[in-house]
């Protein structure tokens, strides 16, 4: 079973969003175009309470992109984004999400961030995604969405560690910063994750 995992395709990560990824909108038609090649489509949704501790607004002496300690983890402070129930937290209407079988929300515990679709950053709590994929007999996971070097990267690393054959769909993701994604790609290759450069490589 081949599953497509669409990570955080939400307005706040798209141009004009609160934590906009440059050219993030370009990946939407590419994701729409490949979806019928998969047995199962699953989405993650960044879904924060307004007082989430990853928001710089919660740390009066700090600025956006400063790094603080959160539950023993280094935490980049972000602008408020993907606040539960707000328009910025919604999936893009340009994405054809009708075939999505399940949505796993993350980042709901205000004390800890959750980049991976599988676990919180401290790996104490799971979202249920791993149990779901195993229950569906998934063996191969193809990962796309936003942002490449954060939620897509950490989701791919955890998928690989969980034993799935894991594909990072490079043509269907965009990074917040170029420097970050180069390092992230090296790390993924080291761990045996397959980087798929073009959609044509999928059709085999
Ligand atoms: C993300 C930063 C904060 C992501 C989510 O989806 O990559 N990045 N929250
Ligand atoms: Zn977030």
Image (cartoon, grey):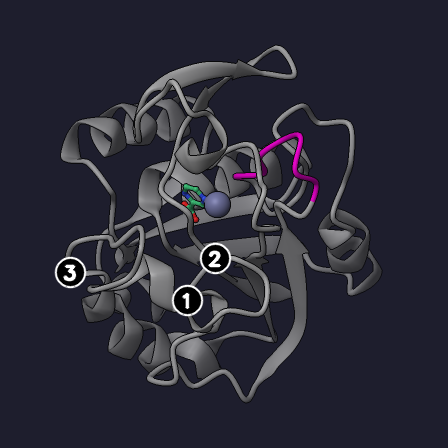
For label 3, the residue is 23
Q: Position of residue 161 (x, y in %)?
A: 63, 31
Q: Position of residue 99 (x, y in %)?
A: 57, 85
Q: Residues within 10 Å of mark 1 (few under 14, many from 20)?
A: many
Question: Vertically, is 24 above or below 153?
Answer: below
For label 2, the residue is 82
Q: Which mark is residue 155?
A: none
How far is the residue under mark 1 from the one under mark 2?
A: 5 Å
How far is the residue under mark 3 from the one under mark 2?
A: 18 Å
Indicate the secondary structure of the residue bearing disc 1.
helix
For label 1, the residue is 88
- Does the magenta run of residues contain 114? yes
- Tag in front: 3 or 1: 1
Asked whether disc 1 touches disc 2, contact meaning CB atoms under 8 Å apart, the reply is yes
Q: Position of residue 92 (x, y in %)?
A: 38, 77
Indicate the secondary structure of the residue bearing disc 3.
loop
Q: Residues within 10 Å of mark 3 (few under 14, many from 20)?
A: some
Quadrant where the C terminus is found in the figure: bottom left
Residue 137: image quadrant is bottom right
- Tag in front: 3 or 2: 2
> Is 150 situated left or right of 126 in this image?
left
- At horizontal 58% and vertical 42% (from top left) the residue drawn is 51
- At horizontal 50% and vertical 41% (from top left) the residue drawn is 156
- Which segment is the magenta one? 109-115
- At horizontal 63% and vertical 50% (from top left) the residue drawn is 106
Q: Indicate yes or no: mark 1 CB to ligand 2 under 8 Å.
A: no
Q: Indicate yes or no: mark 2 CB to ligand 2 under 8 Å.
A: yes
> Is 119 situated left or right of 51 in this image?
right
Q: Position of residue 190 (x, y in %)?
A: 39, 21
Q: Earlier in the sequence, mark 3 or mark 2?
A: 3
Query: Main structural element of the magenta stretch: helix, strand or loop?
Result: loop
Q: Residues within 10 Å of mark 2 (few under 14, many from 20)?
A: many
């Amino acid at each position: 079973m081949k599953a497509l995992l669409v990570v955080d395709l939400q307005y706040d990560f798209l141009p004009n969003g609160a934590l906009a990824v440059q050219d993030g909108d370009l990946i939407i038609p590419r994701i729409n175009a490949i979806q019928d090649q998969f047995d199962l489509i699953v989405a993650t949704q960044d879904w924060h309470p307004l007082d989430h501790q990853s928001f710089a607004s919660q740390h009066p002496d700090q600025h956006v992109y400063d790094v603080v300690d959160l539950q023993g983890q280094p935490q980049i402070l972000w602008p408020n984004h993907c606040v539960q129930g707000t328009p910025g937290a919604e999936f893009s209407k340009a994405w054809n999400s009708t075939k999505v079988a399940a949505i796993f929300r993350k980042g709901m515990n205000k004390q800890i961030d959750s980049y991976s679709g599988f676990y919180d950053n401290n790996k104490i709590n799971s979202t249920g995604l791993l149990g779901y994929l195993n229950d569906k007999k998934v063996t191969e996971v193809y990962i796309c969405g936003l942002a490449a070097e954060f939620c897509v990267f950490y989701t791919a690393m955890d998928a690989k560690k969980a034993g799935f054959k894991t594909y990072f769909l490079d043509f269907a993701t965009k990074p917040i910063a170029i420097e970050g994604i180069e390092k992230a790609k090296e790390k993924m290759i080291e761990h045996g994750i397959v980087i798929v450069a073009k959609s044509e490589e999928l059709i085999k």
